[in-house]
Image: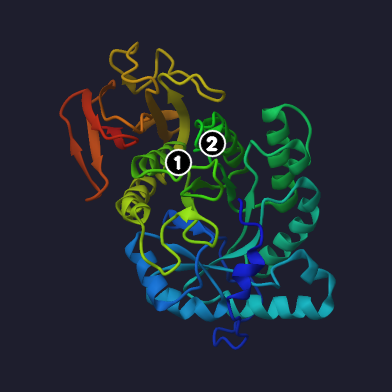
Amino acid sequence: MKVRHLLLFVSLLIVFRGSAFAADPSPKDATEWKVGTPIVTYFAGPPMTEHVARQMAEGGFNVVWCAEKDLDLVHKHGLRGTLHDRLLSPASLDAPAQKQQLDALIDRVKKHPAFYSYYITDEPGASEFPALGKLTGHLRQRDPAHMAYINLFPTYATNQQLGTKGDLCTAYRQYLKLFIDAAKPMLLSYDHYQFSQAADGTQYFVNLGLIRRAAQDAGVPFLNIVQACSWQPGVRVPVPDEMRYLVYTTAAYGAQGISYYVYSHPGHVGAMALADGTPTPLYHAVKPLNREFVAIVAELQPFRSIAVYHTAITELGCEFPPANAVFRLDPPSSKLTERGLLLGNFGKDDKASHVVVVNLDYKNQVLATITAPAVIEEFDASTREWSSLKAQRAELHLPPGGGKLLRLHP
């Protein structure tokens, strides 16, 4: 994440301490936090107002940044709130007065129907994990029904930033392991921005794959923060077709959430809204995509991400489909385009029954034929309905960066 001065945002939020939602601090009757509706959110946005809340809800966002005072407004618009507060810091546990204030805050907000998670920090190094683990443990003990949210570095962070050693994959796996062991997170979140003016980065898929595997090993969901703006001359603003590519690749890897960097923030160009709140072309582009993401990911929640295959790309972390794959590109040697397809396989008991097929060419549409050993059904993400293709073949007209969810006839 490039926005490091979150205090600028938090200082804009006037935090009241008089909420009417005080509750018994005992977690005996609390349930463990669950994702619920797949997450669509953002990193860095404006203070919460009636206009902002309405715009976000209309845009298909369902988790928003807020202060305690904003929870009623968030609830009014059917949104879930990620709470930002200066007390949500490891330092609060070391000062008795601050710890008392933190506990009082937890007790006030934890029964509010709009409250979803506690925002803790962005991109910590490994040296910070022990202190963060104490804070997440404290929050979990007092309020297991709400997540403590921490966002992690991407693979292209330096070893010095990560606080680990080794080559790219070794250092990053160790970084994730140290974090999981110390913080015992309820969700893994990371950011990765690949679109520069000169060329696209080549670590997007290896980062997705490493996070996917670490999340599965830890038994927790994960969230991908994707690029939606420019913050320096060498970084370009993604176009709508590239946003579609980011949304569908995130779903195909099994993520339970997507977040956009940024919604709006000083010094950032593009994003979802201008400084005066006017929606940008990217806002209008992701408006339907957000709903498609939620529909597809919700449909896949009962299943496990089994495997992810690439039919053409040979970047680090990309794997070709095996000859015995359940869902296959026909003919299997076809590239379609230089970037080919992504096949995200889902199912139960390690047997694929569903696949998210993604066109990795975000400049051109493709016609792809997928075959399977049984009759194929196709999911309409706009109506959330399945329809049978009455054949073991599916001819898919995929827009640039777009995808489709298929399944074997149950």
Q: Residue 368: percent from the left, percent from the top?
A: 26, 24
Q: Residue at x 55, y 37 (%)?
A: 212
Is the Cβ of the residue at disc 1 closer than 8 Å to that at disc 2?
Answer: yes
Q: Is mark 1 on a helix, strand or loop?
A: helix
Q: Earlier in the sequence, mark 1 or mark 2?
A: 2
On the image, the x and y values in percent for residue 111 come to: 54, 76
Q: Is residue 271 left or right of residue 241?
A: right
Q: Which of 215 and 338 is in front in this view?
A: 338
Checking the image for residue 208, the label placed there is 2
Q: Residue 215 carries which label?
A: none
The single residue placed furthest to the left in the displayed view is 390
Q: What colouring does the structure picture have?
A: rainbow
**Up-down relation of residue 211 to residue 152 (above or below):** above
**Point 17% across, 24% down: residue:** 391
Residue 201 percent across, percent down from the top left: 54, 32
Question: How many marks are shown on the rendered structure?
Answer: 2
Q: Which residue carries the number 1 mark?
A: 250
Q: Is mark 2 on a helix, strand or loop?
A: helix
Q: Residues within 10 Å of mark 1 (few under 14, many from 20)?
A: many
Q: How far apart are marks 1 and 2 (CA)?
A: 8 Å
